[in-house]
Amino acid sequence: MHLSLFFLLLLHLLFPFFMLEAPTQAQGKSLVSAIFIFGDSTADPGNNNYITTPFKSNFSPYGRDFTNHVPTGRFTNGMLANDFFARYVGVKEYVPPYLDPSLSIEELKSGVSFASAGTGFDPLTPTISNVISLSKQLEYFKEYQEKLEAAIGKEQTQNLIKEALFIVSAGTNDFVVNYNTLPIRRKSYSLSSYTDFLLQHAQLFLQELLDQGARKIGVVGLPPMGCLPVVITLHSDNAFTKRDCTDFFSSIARDYNSKLQNQLNDIQFKFAKLGSRIAYMGIYGPLVDMILGRKYDFEKTNSGCCGTGLLEASFMCNPKSYVCSNATKYVFWDSIHPTEKTYYLISQALQPTIDYITKY
């Protein structure tokens, strides 16, 4: 395989880090009927298992620390943040992939994930790796509602949607896989105008969710993209000895996050009269605290647990790969995705945001 194509395939796996809640039961009034997840790899519990794409993780060592050591399709060693979050709000133990054909109506009722590893807000992004676009995820959500209406009726379905928690997490692929790797969008957009282009698509997506009856919505910001081990590897002067974060990519995330917060504030103001709670979920700060050693006690922050930890992810992190003995010492499981411990800790950091969305 040509070296640049090899790196491009690796970069296709770069997704925003979707961090949510801790597993302890929420205190106070919480009226959460179900949880619905839209987005990319850290929100995908296995939908990509059911489509034709190279970007899957339903094989070991993924899932090494999951219940019964099962590789479910989650891009980590154990649970995702939305699994912790589902426990926190008391709806279920794990959030399953919508495309799993074995799901019962009871399982569907308490929520599913429509997310697909590799997708983004830009409609071009999911075509690069043949994954599920956000518009298709919305189609699946409409299909979901039809299934539920047939089982429990339209009124009950509408009430369930109204009281459900929605999480949207996308954006990193748009920058790292698409804009900064392929020339197509760079010919038409400056970095700033491409950020605005993505936010326009994000706003259209949120408008559609609101039109479908969603009222409690959290939108995850971008992580410090320049601190992902694979980004450090590909952009460092010496990938083995100089493994500091690459601020160019992280600065893109900071700018995007600032604009996203302003946009969400505007949307919340506009739709507050409908009883909506739309909030920004900031993961940049907590992740930087972990990676720079300001908080927590990780031993490895700039390489992953799987393989060398410098480049491996998805099919490159496989049953033949070397794996570290204790993933709790690592921020990252592979060269892109966090460990279960990282998801857990960031879920705790975002607890006040989740409470704001769900308790009123």
Image: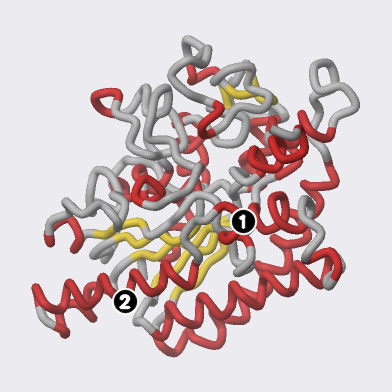
Q: What's the residue at 66%, 68% (across, down)?
A: 260
- Name the side, left or right, on which 303 lies relative to 144: right
Labels 2 and 1: the sequence-earlier one: 1
Type of the residue with mark 2? Lys
Q: Is residue 29 visible?
A: no
Front in this rendered view, residue 170 or 73: 73
Residue marked by disc 2 = 142
Q: Which mark is residue 9?
A: none
- Residue 204 horizontal/vertical position (percent): 56, 80
Q: Decide: is 147 above or below 47.
A: below
Mark 1: few, some, or many residues within 10 Å (few <14, many ≥20)?
some
- Name the side, left or right, on which 239 lies relative to 36: right
- Residue 305 horizontal/vertical position (percent): 55, 20
Q: Secondary structure at mark 2?
A: helix
Residue at the far right: name it. 237
- Residue 205 horizontal/vertical position (percent): 52, 76
> Quadrant of residue 62 in the image?
top left
Q: What's the residue at 60%, 21% (across, down)?
A: 298
Q: Is residue 19 visible?
A: yes
Instruction: Quote the CA–CA distance across marks 2 and 1.
Output: 25 Å
Front in this rendered view, residue 165 or 12: 12
- Name the side, left or right, on which 166 lies relative to 154: right
- Residue 224 horizontal/vertical position (percent): 71, 44
> Quadrant of residue 191 in the image?
bottom right
Residue marked by disc 1 = 128
Q: Secondary structure at mark 1?
A: helix
Type of the residue with mark 1? Ile
Q: Decide: is 290 above or below 96.
A: above
Q: What's the residue at 41%, 88% (across, down)?
A: 274
- Name the side, left or right, on which 258 lies relative to 70: right
